[in-house]
Amino acid sequence: MEPVEVRAPEGARLLEIVWDDDSTTFHRHHVLRGYCPCAVCQGHEGPVRWVEGTESLPDEAFVLRTIEPTGSYAIRLEWGDGHGSGIYTFDHLRALADLFDEPESEAAGHVFHR
Ligand SMILES: [Zn+2]
C-alpha cells in the first residue's frame, strides 16, 4: 500500500496519511518522533524501540519541517530541531498508526521488527 496524500498542517500535532486503498491513518508527531527508525536513534540492528529521552526534547523537536518521499517505499521526516535522518517505511507508518488510540503513557512500550 502507498500513500496518495500526506497532510501535516502548520501547527498541527498530527500527520494524516491517505492510502491508495482509501483508508486514512493518523499519527501523533510525538509517537513518530519516539519511534524514529534512523541509525542515530536506533543503532544499525535490532528492532525499533521508543527512543529514550524523547519526552524531554524541546517542543520544536515535534514540529514537522519537511516531509519528503524517499524511493517508492518510504518518506523522510525532518523535525524542527534539525533531526532529519528518519526514513519511515510505509510498513512502519502503518504499524505506528495502530498506536493512535493509545494513551500517551502506553505508546512508548512497543517493539517493531524491521
Ligand atoms: Zn532518528
Image (cartoon, rainbow, N blue to C red):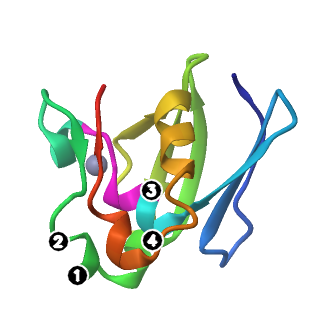
Contact between marks 1 and 2 (CB within 8 A): the answer is yes
Crowding at dot 2, Cα within 10 Å, few <14 / some 14-19 / many 20+, comes out as few
Q: Secondary structure at mark 1?
A: helix
Q: How many marks?
A: 4
Between marks 4 and 2 in the image, the one whose residue lies nearer the viewer: 2
Amino acid type at circle 4 is Phe
* CA distance for labels 3 and 1: 15 Å
Q: Which mark is residue 53?
A: 2
* CA distance for labels 4 and 2: 13 Å
In the picture, measured across the screen, residue 7 lies left or right of residue 67, that is: right
Place of residue 114 in the rendered image (x, y in percent of width and height, measured from the top left): 30, 25
Amino acid type at circle 1 is Ser
Q: As rendered, which of 99 and 38 lies closer to the eye?
A: 99
Q: Which mark is residue 62?
A: 4
Q: Which residue bears the numbered disc 1? A: 56
Residue in view at x 57 percent, y 50 percent:
97
**In the image, residue 19 lies in the stretch drawn in magenta:** no
